[in-house]
Image (tube, rainbow, N blue to C red):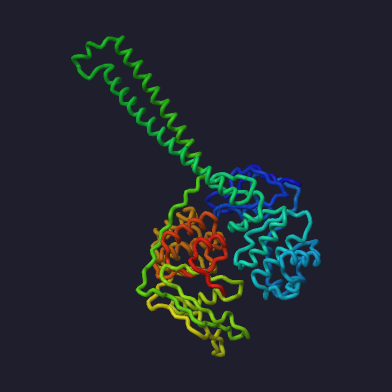
């Protein structure tokens, strides 16, 4: 067992307005299964890169261990090759037989090592790269959000696999994964960093207790500050009146003020003024303690939504519906039947490649939201053929959140103009999702993956719609924001069609599940 000691770590990106880390100190053991938790943009991925030596920083990071990180960067050339051909390029000392053994633990056949990497599904790629990652010896492993874009079955495989390992830092917002796989948590709070034993649920329970105590103590401080201010104001007013009587405002009575009387009044006034200063110091101390208490308090703001009510009860009607791509022998899905009625929140569920995103895009096209989806090949043949019924209500207004954030470029102002959004309201929602104001002056291509996803979510929340269609909206979104969104959807109960592999989210939000 070894330690990783961080002392007085300070880091900021070149040209940045603020520090990502400032005088941060903590230590962790290298045999821990460490879950890394924090808001989007707080520096989780940055810290992993600091451990890997990618950036210069002030302070010290002391350790004798060797680091390796998931995901590996796969080049264009490697995408064309079989993984078996470039495994050693990813990880030195990685022998092929070790990778095969790790894949067996992930319930995956070794044959995927001999297929071109570009042909593998997201789940297969993740399994290959995790297998490579754990094929070394004596490395401390840095794992950055391994379950994004993975279906439920693959997530379960990855969860079971990681729970059997140790000696890693796992960055994830998946509560189910964190509960199953970690025995310690490293948390980036608002102002501090804490290390605690246990899994996510244990930490969350402790945090809720701590936050309840903080809120109660804060109320006490507020009452004490109020009392001190009132007392201070009374004493200050008395002192001012006394000071005025020292020489008297009445010219007639002024002759009656003896030097001794004036001295007595002056001494008493001075004493009262001293008491005022002492009270001001007490008020300042109380204010400092109050601010210290609230430094790490999470107080998520309740989000708002403006769903529209359609005149029809059924918004989407799918009956015996099948879709087959033109270059495929088998249908993407077949004989699919379901309906979306007002107030329902329907989750599409199935393995990667089963057609969830395809179905969403077809529904979007039928409403007129995504006209470009029905493209044709240069020879005039359609991209896919369909049979059965897939109908949408007329005049249906859609609010859509895509998996893809690559289109986000430029500043917030341009984005709002292009999408007819009120910029002040849009920024207010981003602030409610805990995005700092300093981010609003940056280009969106410089945002973290979670911050980009919050941009799409904020745009959707600001759009009044009959039907909200969200395709994996929580990828890269922090735990606190997930809980905010859960609460929002349960309160406003919009009509929704969504794909989301976060088990806890789906169980709380969905009123029905369609298996593909």
In screen coordinates, is 516 left or right of 160? left
Q: Percent position (x, y) of residue 424?
A: 39, 58
The part of the image, by quadrant, that contains residue 330 is: bottom right
Q: Residue 442, percent across and down? A: 50, 58
Side (left or right) of 415 relative to 119: left
- Count of marks placed on residues: 0
Q: Quadrant of residue 40?
A: bottom right
Above or below, 441 against 340 in this view is above
On the rendered image, what quadrant is the C terminus found in?
bottom right
Of 428 and 360, the residue lying toward us: 360
Q: Quadrant of residue 99?
A: bottom right
Please say whether residue 360 is visible from this viewpoint.
yes
Is residue 383 or residue 248 the one in the foreground? Answer: 383
Q: Nearer the viewer, residue 480 or 414?
A: 480
Which residue lies at the image location 26% right of the left edge and 18% below the top edge? 245
Residue 27 picture location, percent across and down: 67, 44
| 253 w.r.t. 98: above or below | above
Q: Residue at x 59, y 45 (%)?
A: 193
Task: Give the percent coordinates (x, y) of residue 410.
Answer: 49, 64
At 32% across and 27% down in the image, what residue appears? Answer: 234
User: As rendered, which of 482 and 16 lies closer to the eye?
Assistant: 482
Above or below, 377 relative to 348? below
On the question of residue 49 being in view, the answer is no
């Amino acid at each position: 067992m070894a330690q990783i000691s961080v002392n007085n770590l300070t880091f900021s990106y070149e040209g940045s307005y603020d520090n990502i880390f400032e005088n941060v100190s903590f230590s962790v053991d290298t045999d821990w299964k460490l879950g890394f938790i924090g808001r989007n943009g707080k520096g989780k991925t940055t810290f992993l890169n600091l451990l890997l030596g990618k950036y210069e920083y002030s302070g010290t990071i002391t350790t004798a261990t060797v680091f390796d990180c998931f995901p590996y960067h796969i080049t264009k050339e490697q995408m064309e090759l079989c993984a078996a051909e470039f495994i050693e390029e990813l990880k030195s000392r990685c022998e092929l037989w070790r990778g095969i053994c790790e894949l067996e633990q992930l319930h995956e056949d070794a044959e995927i090592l001999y297929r071109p990497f570009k042909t593998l599904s997201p789940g297969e790629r993740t399994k290959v790269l995790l297998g490579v990652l754990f094929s070394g010896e004596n490395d401390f492993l840095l794992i950055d959000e391994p379950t994004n874009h993975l279906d439920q079955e693959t997530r379960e495989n990855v969860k079971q696999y990681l729970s059997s390992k140790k000696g890693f830092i796992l960055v994830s917002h998946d509560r189910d994964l964190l509960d199953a796989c970690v025995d310690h948590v490293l948390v980036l709070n608002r102002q501090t960093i804490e290390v605690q034993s246990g899994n996510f649920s244990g930490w969350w329970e402790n945090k809720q207790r701590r936050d309840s105590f903080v809120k109660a103590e804060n109320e006490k401080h507020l009452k004490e500050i109020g009392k001190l201010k009132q007392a201070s104001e009374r004493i200050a007013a008395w002192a001012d009146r006394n000071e005025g009587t020292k020489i008297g405002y009445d010219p007639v009575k002024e002759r009656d003020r003896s030097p001794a009387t004036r001295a007595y009044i002056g001494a008493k006034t001075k004493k009262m003024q001293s008491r005022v200063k002492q009270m001001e110091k007490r008020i300042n101390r109380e204010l400092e303690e109050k601010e210290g208490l609230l430094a790490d308090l999470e107080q998520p703001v309740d989000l708002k939504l403006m769903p529209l009510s359609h005149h029809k009860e059924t918004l989407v009607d799918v009956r015996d519906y099948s879709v087959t791509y033109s270059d495929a022998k088998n249908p993407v899905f077949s004989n699919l039947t379901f309906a979306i009625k007002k107030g329902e929140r329907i989750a599409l569920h199935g393995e990667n490649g089963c057609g969830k995103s395809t179905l969403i895009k077809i529904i979007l096209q039928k409403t007129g939201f995504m006209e470009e989806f029905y493209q044709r090949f240069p020879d005039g043949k359609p991209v896919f053929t369909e049979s059965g019924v897939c109908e949408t209500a007329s005049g249906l207004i859609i609010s859509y959140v895509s998996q893809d954030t690559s289109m986000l470029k430029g500043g917030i102002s341009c984005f709002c103009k292009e999408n007819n959004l009120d910029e002040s309201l849009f920024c207010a929602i981003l602030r409610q999702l805990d995005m700092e104001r300093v981010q609003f002056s940056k280009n969106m291509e410089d945002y973290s993956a979670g911050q980009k996803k919050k941009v799409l979510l904020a745009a959707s929340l600001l759009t009044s719609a009959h039907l909200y269609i969200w395709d994996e909206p929580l990828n890269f979104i922090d735990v606190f924001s997930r809980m905010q969104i859960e609460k929002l959807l349960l309160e406003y109960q919009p009509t929704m069609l969504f794909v989301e592999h976060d088990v806890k989210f789906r169980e709380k939000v969905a009123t029905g599940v369609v298996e593909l």
